[in-house]
Image (cartoon, grey):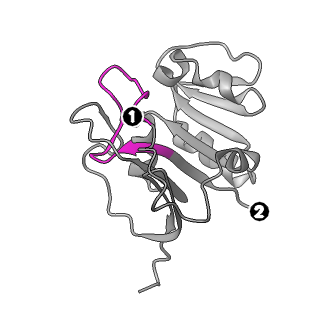
Amino acid sequence: MSGKIILNLAISLDGYIADENGGYDWIVGDDNSKLNTENKSDFAKFLEGIDVVVMGRNCYNQNFHKDYKEKDVYIATSENIADYENYHFMNGDICKTISDLKNQGKNIFLFGGGVVIDSFVKEDIIDEYIIGIIPTILGKGRKLFLENNPKIDLNLQEYSVEDGIIVMKYSKRNKYEN
């Protein structure tokens, strides 16, 4: 049984995943519950189904890896760093390594940042995209999608709204669907 590679993150309305300094304190709702949907995005429940977390070195340097002590964490880096505890440092073909884990039945949470995500988008190996749109226009920062990506058709599977944050879950569209 094959697992899934799942991108799950928040973006500003203009497509940024972090401000210029890598900051994320802007990732908050607008405190307006008027349009809230009955169903809610449940990150804790999402994490229950995850076996592996993938992140780049900048995310590691910001200590995001410490949030995932119960998961195997793979960190993409250009340096040779020894693995320790549940942290695995990779400077080779991360897409192949993670695809191999997926084929072993592992569910992979593609956490970030943009450069790491870009290689997975370009290889078109992400199975699900869970994107939370924050009601903020940053104007500049670190983009989610870099240039020259392939065209990838998606199906909206579900959505929720909570305090102005819209969370959409997409899966890759079957090539034979209309």
Q: Which residues are magenta?
A: 9-27
Mark drawn on residue 1: 2
Q: Is residue 105 magenta?
A: no
Prevalent SS, magenta region: loop
Q: Is residue 64 above or below residue 159?
A: above
* Image quarter hosting the N terminus: bottom right
**Circle 2 — which element?**
loop
Q: Is residue 108 left or right of residue 152?
A: right
The crowding category of the residue bearing disc 2, from other C-alpha atoms within 10 Å (few below 14, some 14 to 19, many at least 20), is few
Q: Amino acid at mark 1?
A: Val
Residue 88 visible in the picture: no
**Circle 1 — which element?**
helix
Q: Is residue 12 left or right of residue 41?
A: left
Residue 20 occupies quadrant:
top left
Q: Residue at x 50, y 24 (%)?
A: 59
Q: Which of the two residues, 35 or 149, is positioned nearer the viewer here? A: 35
Residue 161 visible in the picture: yes
Task: Report which residue position mark 1 lands on.
Answer: 115
Q: Which of the two residues, 37 or 57, is positioned nearer the viewer here? A: 37
The crowding category of the residue bearing disc 1, from other C-alpha atoms within 10 Å (few below 14, some 14 to 19, many at least 20), is some
Q: Amino acid at mark 2?
A: Met
Q: Residue at x 43, y 28 (%)?
A: 24
